[in-house]
Amino acid sequence: MLDDNNTVAPAPIKKFLAWYSEAQTGKRGKSSRSYLISSGFGLLRKTLSVTLPWLNLFRPDIATLATVTPDGKPSARSILFKGLVDGGFSFYTDYESDKGKELALNPSAVMLFCWSVPPRQVRIDGKVQKLSREAAKLYWESRTRANQVAFVAVRQSSILSSREEFIEKARQVEQIYRGKPIPCPDSWGGYSLVPEMIEFWEGRVDWLHDREKYILNNEGWARIKLGP
């Protein structure tokens, strides 16, 4: 998950990576029973991710991204977390989408992960920076053909008269690029949300939940224990 510039991770990043790994399989305990439960959870998650890739269950890479509209209102949507890149939490989108336009005016954003097994939540506050064009092209080439067609056919947040219009536009794109690769659009690219604050919450059966936040200052990351 770490890129070449993040081979030595600070404490909150290490904790996030540990939690993210455990969210992929369920918390792995030392007992054989815990191991079997964890393994079964991991197998179920992998199976569902292949057969039903759009299903949110057991998808630790799905996060909520909150931005600010030009008139100062909150705006949120789900995105796919694509790893730690350039010192931050990366994701890809259309720069001309609503979130892209909002980030162009105000780079401040919040990314929120919420996992059920085990019950945990991670909030990352910071500012985004664009990833390189080379990174955008590499990720674009890794997407499925159907995904590329859908993106080229209709821009994110654009207005459509009907679903039939969407289907027809996708058919036209398929005809234009039949037998040829679909080039990465100029407006397609990635962001890295560079954290200034990371907050961790972990649920407990006795309601004595654990919560702490890390705030970045001139001396590094300061850890603060919080009430649930």
Image: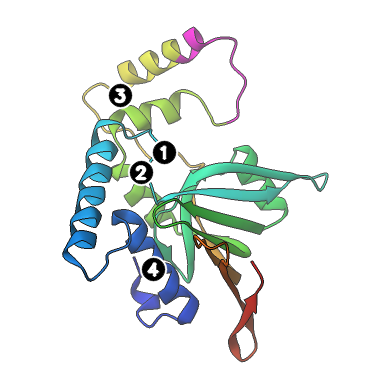
Q: What element carries label 1?
A: loop
Q: Looking at the image, tell me whether mark 3 or mark 4 is earlier in sequence order.
A: 4
Q: Which circle marks residue 177 in the picture? A: 3
Depth-wise, is mark 1 or mark 3 nearer the camera? 1
Amino acid type at mark 3: Tyr
Secondary structure under tag 3 reads: loop
Query: Marks 3 and 2, Cα distance to the nearest angstrom?
Result: 15 Å
Q: Position of residue 14 (x, y in %)?
A: 41, 76
Q: Which of marks 1 and 2 is nearer the N terminus?
A: 1
For label 3, the crowd category at 10 Å Cα-Cα, with few meaning under 14, some 14 to 19 and many 20 or more, is few
Considering every residue shown, the one lying at the far right of the view is 71
Residue to which mark 4 is pinned: 17
Residue 80 in the image: x percent, y percent?
Answer: 44, 47
Task: Find out whether residue 162 is within the magenta segment.
Answer: yes
The amino acid type found where label 2 is placed reads Trp
Q: State the residue in front, 202 or 18.
A: 202
Circle 1 residue: 56
Quadrant of the image for the C terminus?
bottom right
Tell me which label, 3 or 2, sits earlier in the chain. Answer: 2
* Above or below, comparing residue 207 to residue 178 in the picture: below
Residue at point 34%, 74% (across, down): 4
> The magenta stretch spans which residues?
157-166
Distance of label 1 from label 2 (alpha carbons) = 22 Å
Disc 3 vs disc 2: which is toward the camera? Answer: 2
Q: How many residues crowd mark 4 within 10 Å: few (<14), some (14–19), many (20+)? A: some
Q: Residue 140 carries which label?
A: 2
Q: Quadrant of residue 26?
A: bottom left
Q: Please tell me whether mark 4 or mark 2 is closer to you in this view.
A: 4
Which of the marked residues, 1 or 3, is nearer the chain's N terminus?
Answer: 1
Q: Residue 165: x, y in percent?
A: 50, 10
- Of callouts 4 and 1, the N-terminal one: 4
Q: Could you tell me if the residues under marks 3 and 2 are in contact, i.e. CB atoms within 8 Å?
A: no
